[in-house]
Amino acid sequence: MKKRGKKYLESAKLVDRAILYEPKEAFEIVQKAARAKFDETVEVHVRLGVDSRHADQQVRGAVVLPHGTGRTVRVLVFAKGEKATEAENAGADYVGAEDLVEKIQKENWFDFDVVVATPDMMGVVGRLGRLLGPKGLMPNPKAGTVTMDVAKAIADIKAGKIEYRLDKTNIVHCPIGKVSFGTEKLLDNFRTLMDALIKAKPAAAKGQYLRSVVISSTMGPGIKINQQKVLD
């Protein structure tokens, strides 16, 4: 059995596991329960009533959070010519083509958080599928990271764009900010994410779509939110 630290056990006393909390109350508790010495990230974990084994029940996309995530995001862009210059001017941290593919392959270099590529570069980027795929870094049109408008993609990412994606257990995990944001900003980001997930409901999904919604800080306990209140 996993042993919990003293701070976690103290924080866990603030949460009644038998209760489904109102969203606002849940975010008030998550801030009180965050006792680490650093500014903890607040995460949302949503179990959906879909089956990730079926292609027509996949849930994937991206959304720009109104208050960002509180993280400094490093963006790598695969582009050439004018689009490479556009990416540099837009604030991309790294811009290149075959040279960056080689660097990643030979040096196991991953000093970036998001990868953007122009469509014509996907043949080159495809060589990195086995390396980028497992890390969730492969550019994807649904996430807006395969695009000719690299300037907009970079601006959105730097402003707080996050990608949501169903995992093998039918759960979506997303960061929505820092504990220091306060209740109102966290609530705004939470509602923006939940609206996007609800709109992304596959037509093939049957029955209850939102099965459970849990929030937590990096080192804190999970707090269950009443999913019906999310829909109100």
Image: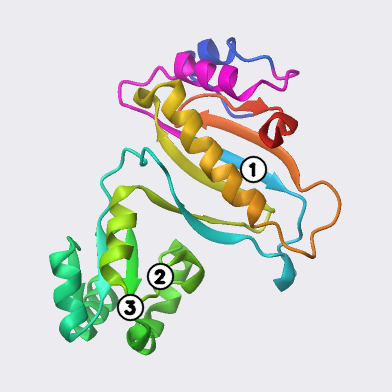
Q: Does the stretch in magenta take in 98?
A: no
| Image mark for residue 148 | 3
The picture places residue 40, in percent across and down from the top left corner, at: 38, 29
Distance of label 1 from label 2 (alpha carbons): 24 Å
Q: Name the residue under label 2.
A: 132
**What amino acid is at disc 3?**
Met
- Of circles 1 and 2, the one toward us is 1
The picture places residue 125, in percent across and down from the top left corner, at: 35, 81
Residue 69 visible in rendering: yes
Name the residue rendered at 48%, 19% in the picture: 5
Q: Earlier in the sequence, mark 1 or mark 3?
A: 1
- Whether residues under marks 2 and 3 lie with C-beta atoms below 8 angstroms apart, the answer is no
In the drawing, does residue 192 fall left or right of residue 117? right
- Of circles 2 and 3, the one toward us is 3
Q: Give the range drawn in magenta.
A: 17-42
The picture places residue 4, in percent across and down from the top left corner, at: 53, 22
Between 107 and 42, the one nearer to me in the picture:
42
